[in-house]
Image (cartoon, rainbow, N blue to C red):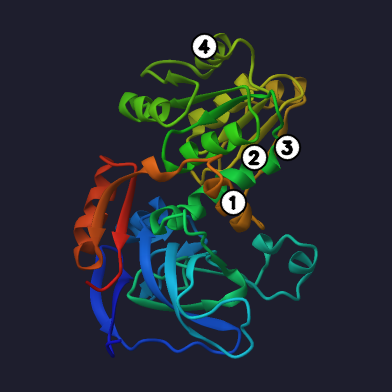
Amino acid sequence: MTDVNLSAILYKKLDLRLEERPIPEPAKGEVQLCMQKVGICGSDVHYWQHGRIGDRFIVTGPMLLGHECSAVVTKVGEGVSHLKVGDRVAIEPHGVCRTCEQCKSGRYNLCPNVFFLATPPDSGALARYHVHGADFVFKLPDNVSFEEGALIEPLSVGLHACRRARLAMGHRVLVCGAGPIGLCAMLSAKAFGASAVCVTDIDPKRLEFAKEVGATHTVLIERGSSEEEVAKKVAETLGGAPDRTIECSGAQFSVNLGVFATKPGGVFTIVGHGPNKVEFPVVSLVAKEIEIVGSFRYINTWQTAIDMISCGKINVAPLVTHRYTLEETMQAFEMSKSGQGVKVMIDCAKK
């Protein structure tokens, strides 16, 4: 092991640097990890390009990016018994207080004292080495790759959204947005037993990819189309209005679409972070008694996601379209920014 730790540090908007830092040592209840694969999330690119997401998450000082992670355990801190050196693992990027009302009720994703990798002011894990709370580190079976382990994070967003939507066998589902989160929501909906899943997007290439990886139907949102027109097309495509809609784009158009498309008495789950304020077609919302549900990150999804991948119920491997080394981090971010790929993966292991 070397005495340096190559790390991707964002200092401020448009100022991302690769620097060497000391290797961190695990404290009580922590493990030291040699990072293997780290996926680039849209939020990582947004912080790099804009220095903030909304008014809540603002880059105010140097921070590491990266929260879609897999690794190998290299040291074990005091009190850790379920992990050992050499274990292949996936990392849930949470760290919570464990004592507040939300944590005690099991909704730790809503902890007011939450630590979350690569979300200001908390640093991420796009580095050669990282330390993390051992209770948020999960072993990977031999048949689950490091890339699949890193994809547990976006997949967990989709799984949690489906749980929040109370999605069940036989439901027709609309997923708004064919980015990585939308694709993971689609894969999760199918695993939950949805009879049909329609994905919408403004990009025909993304919709083509969505069909390749499992969407049963797609609808292209064409310039000049109204939300009501697209909602009608979705219903015609699915053979009926969707029982559940999962919005993953954050776009005002898709928020309106979700209300118009979802069947009366259905559930509309919002995942995408768009503008701080959006409008709803309230008359339709009320008259149809649509239930609107927010979905924020995830709760207790890691082991489920790992098991679903291991048994072959969900296949996330095709989502990785571009691969780079840690030394090529800037090229990786430029590729992710370009939108040419779906999921860009960085290999952090020392060659």
Q: Residue at left 55%, top 15%?
A: 228
Circle 4 — which element?
helix
Q: Is residue 250 visible?
A: no
Q: Badge 3, how many Cα within 10 Å: few under 14, some, many 20+? A: few
Q: Nearer the viewer, residue 20 or 84?
A: 84
The residue located at (34%, 73%) in the rendering is 127
Q: Quadrant of the N terminus?
A: bottom left
* Residue 247 locus on image (x, y percent): 55, 35
Kindly identify which residue carries mark 1: 307
Q: Nearer the viewer, mark 3 or mark 1?
A: 1
The residue that label 3 is drawn on is: 166
Residue at 25 percent across and 74 percent down: it is 350
Numbered marks: total = 4
Type of amino acid at the residue the image marks with label 1: Asp
Marks 3 and 2, how far apart at CA? 6 Å
- Find residue 193 and report its image quarter: top right
Front-lying residue, 269 or 75: 75
Mark 2, secondary structure of its residue: helix
**Residue at mark 2:** 162
Work out how far the residue at label 2 is from the one at label 1, CA to CA, in angstroms: 17 Å
Q: Which quarter of the rendering shows the C terminus?
A: bottom left
Q: Secondary structure at mark 3?
A: loop
Going by the numbered disc 3, the residue's amino acid type is Arg
Q: Which residue is mark 4?
A: 233
Q: Residues within 10 Å of mark 4 (few under 14, many from 20)?
A: some
Mark nearer the N terminus (3 vs 1): 3
